[in-house]
């Protein structure tokens, strides 16, 4: 038996239909961010700030203390960077302290940590070595434990979760050499054969795949009589015959991660290992990522905290023109940005995580916004630290140490953080994903009006429904609490944050009005206006971050925990954020989008090819995308299980 070698040919419309079918179609719980994009500032959904239970906090703090001791005494970050590998004994030590089972319920041998404390642990581990943070998060955030927790049968949980909690590393395999954020073209197949499925295909960028014991694999089940088919999720034992790790990939950053290329040739997987029904794979993946994406903001918070520490210490020690560089305004502005933004990133992460634990809200947009915002701002923080450090920021830690200076890996942090803008949904894809959710209410009532394939009868019905919805909604965008000077008075202390919350409320309504106007103007072409949609999402992200920062500051004040200082940081962040918001609003309508499209057409047609004259291309020979036809492997198996 052999799988078909031809790859799916998918039209743009078919690809969109696959993505749309994988979305959670209904909103069964409230969503702060969804309401924000609709112009409704529901502060009551996030304030007072939700909190973990005392028992959860105690369990979490006890593990954080154990993990901190391990990271300080057992982890040599310079060694991992130098050798591009986490030592086996370090991974074995992580297993021994239970780090593989942080999110797994105690009845399966895990630690049962909340999302809040899981992310605090990732922040701590990631500060010791980003590669360790990736190992742990790839295993638990998107690897086998999370989809099994959400969608697995009791038998599957009993079989696999105890192993994941203590001994077995897992990985998640979706991406292929020619398939990224367009899963409709997925080529890996799972052909039913008796009580098994037979897997054939190649998976790329399999984080943890080189050392994994268990894999969650997304494969296409062919549609046939009595079978729905479609993209389906399977738990696969890595030692199954026919699995070959063909390459261990190397990257500009995160040098210690075990990321590879995995080939499946006639791999038999029991039907009992299928997660959920056939065709549910993408929905499982997207649902898993709702909270799984929060691992990336955790790594960004870790970087922000470290960058702040180095910026503070270096800027006090380094003098220029008679005073420490921190007291020069050009450098001081960068330090202020790092401090204020780090405060906001932690606020966004903790709020989103606690909302996930509380399970009272639908956080699909909040989680996506947290990933998008943290990955972009984390990169800027690291870039500013390199600038503050000057030539030493560009120099490697090993070189600094060799000539007698403190081995500060600023350039490494910049390299390590860069992938976060691509991992688990690039910034561009996150813009589209969030924008789709943000306009869901509009498409629900008026989608048929702009769908060219709908009948006149359907359009008439949609028009009536839209008329009712907008008659109620639009008047509410005219005025609100943000125009009343006394609104949100509980945030008015020695430092006044109430004005920032009024700003958020006013600009949430302004954003909703702009979105409605754009839908009225472009209708069915709205989905092609990716520049506009990206700016809408970026405005929403800033408003969400401002809200989280203010709510966190008030929480810390109420607890007597650096409240005055927290208010100062929140105030600084909001003032910086408001400048960015104003610029983004201006660029909604004043931009170069049309001209950019013209230039792109010229570039792609060769009109500007003369501009490339005068250089040589040092790239090697080979195809742009590696051949990944199914078949037996011709390479050695680089799979390296750990102990």
Image (cartoon, grey):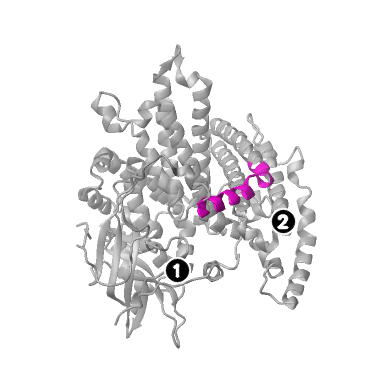
Query: Residue 516: horizontal and vertical position, in percent?
Result: 72, 56
Query: Is label 2 in a helix, a strand or a loop?
Result: helix
Is 184 above or below relative to 624?
below
Reply yes or no: does residue 372 show up in magenta: no
Query: Residue 226: horizontal and vertical position, in percent?
Result: 45, 87
Residue ID at (52%, 70%): 11
The image quadrant where one finds the N terminus is bottom left
The image quadrant where one finds the C terminus is bottom left
Q: Give the range drawn in magenta.
A: 584-606
Count of number-bearing discs:
2
Is 478 above or below relative to 556?
below
Q: Report the front residue among 227 and 529.
A: 529
> Would residue 494 be found to the left or right of residue 128 on screen?
right
Q: Is residue 111 visible?
A: no
Give me the disc on residue 516: 2
Query: Is label 1 in a helix, a strand or a loop?
Result: helix
Q: Report the front residue among 497 and 595.
A: 595
């Amino acid at each position: 038996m052999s799988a078909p070698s031809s790859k799916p040919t998918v039209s743009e419309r078919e690809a969109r239909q696959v993505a749309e079918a994988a979305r959670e179609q209904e909103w069964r719980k409230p969503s702060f961010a969804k309401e924000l994009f609709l112009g409704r500032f529901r502060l009551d959904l996030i304030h007072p700030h939700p909190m973990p239970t005392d028992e959860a906090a105690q369990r979490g703090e006890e593990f954080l203390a154990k993990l901190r001791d391990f990271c300080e005494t057992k982890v040599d970050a310079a060694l991992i960077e130098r050798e591009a590998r986490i030592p086996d004994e370090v991974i074995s030590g992580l297993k021994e302290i239970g780090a593989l089972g942080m999110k797994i319920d105690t009845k399966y041998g895990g630690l049962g940590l909340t999302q809040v404390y899981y992310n605090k642990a990732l922040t701590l581990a990631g500060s010791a070595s980003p590669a360790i943070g990736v190992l742990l998060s790839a295993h638990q955030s998107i690897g086998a434990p999370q989809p099994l927790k959400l969608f697995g049968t009791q038998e599957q949980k009993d079989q696999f979760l105890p192993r994941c909690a203590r001994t077995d590393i897992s990985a998640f395999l979706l991406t292929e050499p020619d398939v990224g954020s367009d899963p409709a073209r997925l080529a890996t197949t799972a052909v039913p054969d008796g009580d098994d499925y037979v897997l054939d295909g190649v998976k790329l960028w399999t984080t943890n795949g080189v050392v994994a014991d268990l894999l969650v694999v997304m494969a296409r089940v062919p549609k046939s009589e009595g079978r729905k088919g479609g993209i389906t999720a399977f738990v696969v034992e890595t030692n199954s015959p026919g699995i070959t790790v063909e390459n261990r990939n190397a990257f500009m950053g995160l040098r210690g991660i075990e990321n590879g290329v995995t080939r499946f040739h006639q791999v038999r997987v029991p039907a009992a290992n299928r997660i959920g029904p056939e065709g549910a794979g993408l929905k499982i993946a997207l649902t898993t990522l709702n909270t799984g994406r929060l691992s990336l903001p955790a790594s960004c918070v870790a970087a922000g905290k470290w960058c702040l520490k180095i910026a503070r210490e270096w800027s006090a020690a380094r003098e220029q023109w008679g005073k420490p560089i921190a007291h020069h305004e050009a450098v001081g502005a960068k330090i202020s940005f790092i401090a204020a933004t780090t405060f906001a990133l932690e606020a966004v992460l903790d709020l989103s995580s606690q909302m996930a634990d509380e399970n009272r809200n639908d956080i699909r947009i909040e989680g996506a916004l947290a990933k998008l915002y943290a990955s972009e701002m984390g990169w800027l923080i690291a870039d500013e630290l390199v600038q503050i450090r000057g030539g030493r920021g560009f120099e490697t830690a090993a070189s600094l140490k060799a000539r007698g200076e403190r081995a500060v890996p600023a350039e490494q942090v910049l390299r390590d953080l860069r992938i976060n803008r691509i991992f688990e949904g690039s910034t561009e894809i996150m813009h589209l994903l969030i924008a789709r959710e943000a306009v869901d209410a509009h498409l629900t009532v008026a989608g048929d009006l702009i769908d060219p394939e709908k009948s006149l009868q359907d359009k008439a019905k949609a028009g009536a429904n839209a008329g009712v919805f907008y008659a109620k909604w639009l008047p509410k965008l005219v005025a609100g609490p943000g125009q009343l000077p006394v609104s949100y008075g509980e945030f008015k202390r020695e430092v006044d944050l109430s004005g920032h919350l009024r700003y958020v409320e006013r600009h949430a309504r302004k954003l909703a009005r702009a979105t409605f106007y754009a839908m009225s103007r472009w209708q069915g072409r709205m989905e092609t206006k990716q520049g506009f949609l990206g700016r809408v999402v970026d405005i929403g992200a800033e408003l969400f971050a401002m809200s989280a920062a203010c709510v966190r500051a008030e929480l810390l004040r109420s607890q007597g925990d650096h409240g005055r200082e927290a208010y100062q940081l929140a105030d600084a962040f909001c003032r910086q954020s408001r400048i960015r918001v104003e610029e983004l609003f201006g660029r909604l309508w004043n931009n170069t989008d049309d001209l950019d499209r013209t230039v792109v057409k010229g570039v792609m047609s060769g009109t500007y090819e003369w501009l490339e004259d005068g250089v040589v291309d040092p790239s090697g020979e080979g195809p742009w995308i590696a051949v990944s036809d199914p078949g037996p492997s011709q390479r050695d198996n680089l799979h390296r299980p750990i102990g």
